[in-house]
C-alpha cells in the first residue's frame, strides 16, 4: 500500500536519487538552463525546506521504500496595487521514480498538496511544466490545472 507522509532528514539519501531523476528531465528538456547537481548538493537544502513555515515536502512510500516526493511552497503576491493579495500554493518539484509511474501516485500527491494548500490559506495552486513534456502536461490537466500564462524568453 502506498502512503504519503511528511519528509524527514532520514529521507535525504533517497531524495538525492529522486532529485537526480528530476534533474535528468530538466537537462533533457532544457539543457540551456539545467545541469546535474553534484552528489549530496540537494540534501543541503532539505533541512531548510523541512524547517520552513512556508514550504513542505511530502514523500510517497511503499513498504518502507520512498518512491517519490513533492516539494511545495506558499507564495504571497507581491504588494503591488494592481495585484490581489492572494497566496499561491506552488508545486516546486514533483517526481515519482520511473518504475512506479502511472499508478496514481502523482494524483495522490496532488490531493495531499491541495489539502496542505487549503489548510494554509492558499487561494490557488500553481506549477510549471516543460512545453515538451506532453505526459506531464496531460497529468496536470487531469488534476485540474489549466494554462493561465505562457512564459517566453530570449537568449541575450
Image (tube, rainbow, N blue to C red):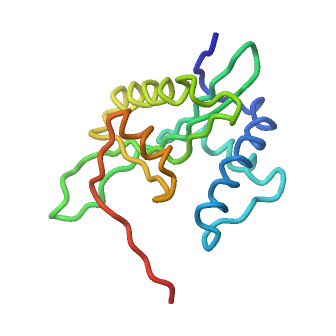
Q: How many marks?
A: 0
Q: Quadrant of residue 95?
A: top right
- Which residue ends up furthest to the right in the rendered image? 39
Image point (82%, 58%), residue name: 38
Q: In which quadrant will I find the N terminus? A: top right
Give the camera-side residue of 129 and 55.
129
Image point (22%, 50%), residue name: 85
- Using residue 106 as the reference point, say whether residue 147 is left or right of it: left
Image point (58%, 20%), residue name: 4
- Which residue ends up furthest to the left in the rendered image? 82
- Which residue ends up furthest to the top in the rendered image? 1
- Using residue 5 as the reference point, say whether residue 87 is left or right of it: left
* Residue 67 in the image: above or below residue 132: above
Q: Quadrant of residue 30?
A: bottom right
Q: Quadrant of residue 119?
A: top left
* Residue 23 in the image: above or below residue 100: below
Q: Position of residue 151 (x, y in %)?
A: 37, 67
Image point (50%, 90%), residue name: 156
Q: Position of residue 73 (x, y in %)?
A: 47, 44
Q: Position of residue 147 (x, y in %)?
A: 30, 52
* Residue 23 in the image: above or below residue 80: above
- Using residue 32 as the reference point, say whether residue 87 is left or right of it: left
Q: Position of residue 132 (x, y in %)?
A: 50, 58
- Using residue 11 as the reference point, say whether residue 2 is left or right of it: left
Amino acid at each position: 500500500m502506498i502512503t504519503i507522509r511528511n519528509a524527514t532528514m532520514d529521507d535525504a539519501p533517497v531524495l538525492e536519487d529522486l532529485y537526480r531523476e528530476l534533474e535528468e528531465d530538466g537537462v533533457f528538456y532544457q539543457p540551456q538552463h539545467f545541469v546535474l547537481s553534484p552528489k549530496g548538493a540537494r540534501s543541503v537544502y532539505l533541512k531548510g525546506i523541512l524547517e520552513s513555515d512556508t514550504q513542505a515536502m511530502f514523500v510517497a512510500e511503499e513498504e518502507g521504500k520512498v518512491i517519490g516526493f513533492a516539494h511545495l511552497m506558499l507564495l504571497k503576491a507581491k504588494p503591488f496595487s494592481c495585484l490581489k493579495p492572494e497566496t499561491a500554493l506552488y508545486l516546486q518539484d514533483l517526481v515519482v521514480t520511473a518504475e512506479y509511474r502511472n499508478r496514481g501516485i502523482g494524483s495522490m500527491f496532488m490531493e495531499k498538496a491541495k489539502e496542505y494548500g487549503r489548510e494554509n490559506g492558499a487561494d490557488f495552486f500553481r506549477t510549471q511544466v516543460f512545453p515538451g513534456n506532453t505526459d506531464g502536461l496531460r497529468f496536470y490537466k487531469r488534476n485540474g490545472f489549466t494554462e493561465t500564462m505562457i512564459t517566453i524568453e530570449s537568449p541575450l
